[in-house]
Amino acid sequence: MVDVVGRLRAVRVPRALVVLAVRSLIVLVPMGLVVLGLVAYQHYSRLRSGSDAARFEVGVPTAERAALTLRSAPAAAVGSPTAEVEDSRGSASGSAVESPVSLAAAAPSPDALDLASVYPANLMNPKYWDDSGWAGSLPFGGPGLPEGYEPVSSLDGGVVSGVAGSAAFRILIPAVGLDSGVMDLGIIDLGDYLAYETPDNTVGHIPDSANPGELSRGWYFGHLRSILQGEGSVFHRLPEISSLIMEDPVDVTLVTADGEYLYRVVATELLHEDDLHLTRAADSRITLVTCWPPNVYDRRILVHAELIALKRVS
């Protein structure tokens, strides 16, 4: 710096210009270092993206899940055709996927039913799934269903009762302090393709997916963060559910004009954004989706839950 000033003086540069140059360097050099640090951090974050996938790969073991639901498939429904839906970006390119799930797969095997009599998962807290021989006295689901709710099979949902069909306008997840509105997402034309609009300070429901209680999968999207667009961070605590369900059940309530539907989380996972497709299901379930990781957002956290109870409107 002294050498630069000396050379400037040697060529008789005005003192004011020298001072301005020095001050500019003092300001620009730290700013350059900050920008360089941010670029390096972004690059590192992209390289690390997906490295924490195991953290989100959590689910109820198959045998315990069969014991929890103890459901059987209606014979007439077995072998129902598969369904096709658009991919997660709402592309009009015809890139559809099939859901090869049949109701026959939902029935628990005899071995699972035998296991249920020894290790009743509906009475076992998830924290003991890895060591069921030492299961404590804490029950799965705590003290029971909330007041006014009646248990239902996810294979029946509200379809049998004649209640299902209305869109949800509110979603609650007490375990992560979520209480938000729900809106159906519209489709916008981006020129080369169509896409669903992004939810603005609310949880967005894909309108072609199931409504609460219907026999299929309802898809619900929300922002982890939306600083630049200002569209809120309604799902900022959704990543916590992966660890929470290993301690206690996490329930999701969808409120409609016809009733309240209680879904219990059974699994979470992490996918690359290109691997996410909107599929249907053979029973009544929902999937909540948000972006991950922060500042990169090239992955999607999925939280899967199935219907366990219904509260009818008086």
Image: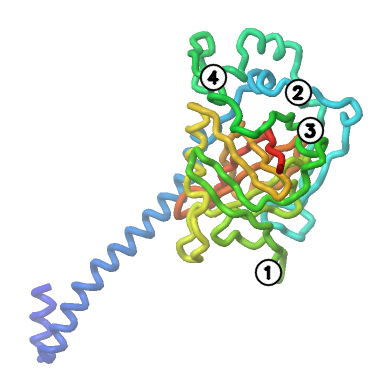
Give the x, y percent position of residue 294: 45, 51
Q: Earlier in the sequence, mark 3 or mark 1?
A: 3
Checking the image for residue 156, the label placed there is 3
Give the x, y percent position of residue 28: 25, 72
Q: Earlier in the sequence, mark 4 or mark 3?
A: 4
Query: How far separated are the C-alphas under marks 3 and 2?
Result: 10 Å
Which one is in front in this view, the residue at disc 2 or the one at disc 1? 2
Query: How far separated are the C-alphas under marks 2 and 4?
Result: 20 Å
Q: Amino acid at mark 3?
A: Asp
Quarter holding the C terminus?
A: top right
Secondary element at image label 1: loop
Checking the image for residue 71, the label placed there is 2
Which one is in front in this view, the residue at disc 3 or the one at disc 1? 3
Q: Amino acid at mark 2?
A: Arg
Checking the image for residue 72, the label placed there is none
Give the x, y percent position of residue 273: 60, 50
Q: Are marks 1 and 4 in contact (CB under 8 Å)?
A: no
Q: How dense is the environment of label 1, judged by Cα within 10 Å: few (below 14), some, or many (20 and up)?
A: few
Q: Are marks 3 and 1 in contact (CB under 8 Å)?
A: no
Q: Are marks 3 and 2 in contact (CB under 8 Å)?
A: no
Secondary element at image label 3: loop
* Front position in the image: 12 or 304: 304
Checking the image for residue 190, the label placed there is 1
Give the x, y percent position of residue 31: 28, 68
Secondary element at image label 2: loop
Q: Are marks 4 and 3 in contact (CB under 8 Å)?
A: no
Q: Amino acid at mark 1?
A: Leu
Query: How far separated are the C-alphas under marks 2 and 1?
Result: 44 Å
Residue marked by disc 4: 139
